[in-house]
Image: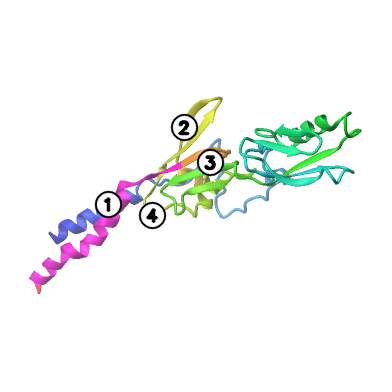
Amino acid sequence: MRNLCAVLLLAVALSACAGREPLRSSSQLTVIENEATLPPPDRNDLTAGDRPSLIGPLDTIQVDVFNVPELSREMQVDASGRISMPLIGTIDARGKTAGELAEAVESALRGRYVRNPDVTVNIKSSVSQVVAIDGQVIEPGLYPVTNQMTLLRAIASAKGLAEFAKQDDVVILRTVNGRKMAGLYNIDAIRRGVYDDPAIFANDVVVVGDSPQRRLFRDFVSLAPLLAAPLIAIVQ
């Protein structure tokens, strides 16, 4: 009985650790070997590509009209995605970038109220630009999406993978042109540089799968001393 427990424990442990291969260079990855030093990044490598942030309901924005302090103010977008300003009334802000909303305010002011208006809009805080992270992470929830958000950074925002996370079963759910789509990713492969860390966008849903093998391993380790105890008593 004791030998059987040991064999089973070893089998579970080996199954949890098997499958890892050494890194090799590919079209997606250049592996630096023999303790060579990684080259420093170029300046362009340190910035992410432009990923516009869209204004949504309940976001807080700052609208500044140059030389017209009476119209400059911080405001919250209402639940329907609109803002209200003196002289021009309500403007639909939902789905616009800060620049697009500034142009809309300028157009509403031009000619009738302000000659050659110069308007700047800044998003101060956003509750609409979020990603939902669920499944086997430490702290599931909604997290703000930044211009440099990727899958690994999103998971790090949720305090990392939980004990029973299945690293090769991570799904990104996304709606593209009204069509629901899903992408399946392997966190361990991304960490090892096998392929790029995918970008995360507002309204994405990230789901980290559950590993039954990890649960089995934990349960077996916790039960092993109990299974061995009668054998030890008999031997004594």
- N-term-proximal mark, 2 vs 4: 4
Range of magenta residues = 207-235
Q: Disc 1 versus disc 4: distance between alpha carbons?
A: 12 Å
Residue closest to the far bottom: 236
Classify the position of the C terminus by image quarter.
bottom left
x and y percentages locating residue 32 in the rendered image: 57, 48
Q: Amino acid at mark 3?
A: Ser
Residue 163's label in the rendered image is 4
Foreground mark, 3 or 1? 1
In the structure shown, which secondary structural element does the residue marked by tag 1 occupy? helix
Q: For the residues marked 2 and 1, what is the alpha-carbon distance in whole angstroms?
A: 28 Å
Amino acid beneath label 1: Leu
Q: Secondary structure at mark 3?
A: loop
Q: CA distance from mark 3 to mark 4?
A: 31 Å
The secondary structure type at the circle numbered 4 is: loop
First reached walking from the N terminus: tag 2 or tag 3: 3
Instruction: Evaluate whether residue 192 shows in this view.
Output: no
Q: Amino acid at mark 2?
A: Ala
Identify the disc placed on residue 216: 1
For marks 1 and 4 on the same chain, the one whose residue lies earlier in the sequence: 4
Q: Residues within 10 Å of mark 2 (few under 14, many from 20)?
A: few
The answer for how far apart the CA atoms under marks 2 and 4 are is 24 Å
In the displayed orientation, state which residue is furthest to the right: 115
Secondary structure under the numbered disc 2 in the rendered image: strand
Name the dominant secondary structure of the magenta segment.
helix
Expressed as whole percent of the image width and height from the top left, the position of residue 114 reads 89, 34
**Local crowd at mark 4 within 10 Å, few (<14), some, or many (≥20)?**
some
Percent coordinates x, y for residue 140 in the rendering: 46, 49
Among numbered discs 2 and 1, the one appearing first in the sequence: 2
